[in-house]
Amino acid sequence: MKLKAFLQSYKRNNDEDELLYLASEILNKKKSELIILLDEEIDQKNKELLIPYLIKYHDTTLPIQYILGYSYFYGLKLIVNEDVLIPRFETEELVERLINCINQKYPKNKKLSILDLGCGSGAISLALKKNLGEFDVTIYASDISLKALNVTKNNMENLKLDLKLINSDLFKNLDDLKFDIIVSNPPYVSKIADTASDVYLHEPHLALYASNNGLYYYEQILNNAYPYLNNEYIIAFEHGYDQKNALIKLINESNFKHDSLSTYQDLAGQDRIIIIEGKK
């Protein structure tokens, strides 16, 4: 049987790119290399490698990343499972904007303390740790979910990047720690109807949904962050594509002191990021 026909026999929808991506990862080939092989006979060894993954793909609605057990984020290969969200491309934009802001604001070699609230797989924390090597940076990765923190721990160990892990519901277990930077991609989906079925069925609801039209966690962070900030600080948020104006209003009504507020879009042109800078 030719590779193309073999793969299509496991198709669960009309998205052939998903099958190509899955096969390219399992066979350790670039997509362009795999396309060349589509009209060639598939050998038994490759069949045996592919079949367990393709059966799971065909028989379930699991996202590809959960089937593989990993995802890519900002150049890092991260373990993911159903205890954590799959890292999104828009969150890479949050990391990129925050790194640029840090580089512009602080002198090199400065000692920095960063808090990642709701770290999930550790994607943001690990990407920052990997790419802020010119600073003396300590990153605290915090999550309410012990299962999520275990995924972060495994990723930290695999990548040999040091983080401080904290099991906490927002600021509850942070004691007297203070931070130069707080970054968060909190739950911000307001309605189940806003999510695709595979996301709703498989990704952790604790990390997806929030009350108050999706603004609950931003409100909690803004109302409680001030005592945990050093004198000069940055707060960076990812938010829903339709939440920018509501979040800006929330920031301005919260009496949260800030010198500047910058908004950014993701690569799809959707409003997605807010960065606050200030001094006490």
Image (cartoon, rainbow, N blue to C red):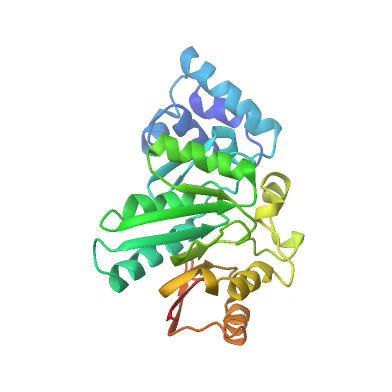
User: Is residue 16 among what the camera can see?
Assistant: no
In the image, 248: left or right of 115? right
The residue at 65%/57% (across/down) is 169
**Residue farthest along the top direction in this orientation:** 44
Q: Picture quarter containing residue 149?
A: top right
Q: Picture quarter containing residue 247?
A: bottom right
Towards the viewer: 138 or 50: 138
The image quadrant where one finds the C terminus is: bottom left
Counting the numbered discs, the total is: 0
Q: From the top left corner, tell me how far across and down residue 22 is, in percent.
A: 51, 35
The residue at 65%/64% (across/down) is 188
**Residue farthest along the front direction in this orientation:** 176
Q: Is residue 52 above or below residue 184?
A: above
The residue at 63%/80% (across/down) is 246
Q: Is residue 157 above or below residue 111?
A: above
In the image, 205: left or right of 255? right
Towards the viewer: 190 or 181: 181
Q: From the top left corner, tell me how far across and down residue 4 is, in percent.
A: 51, 29
User: Is residue 247 among what the camera can see?
Assistant: yes
The residue at 65%/39% (across/down) is 62
Towards the viewer: 158 or 221: 221
Q: From the top left corner, tell me how far across and down residue 66 is, in percent.
A: 59, 38
In the image, 73: left or right of 248? left
Q: Is residue 160 above or below residue 118?
A: above
Towards the viewer: 77 or 131: 131
Q: From the top left corner, tell me how far across and down residue 126 is, in percent.
A: 42, 49
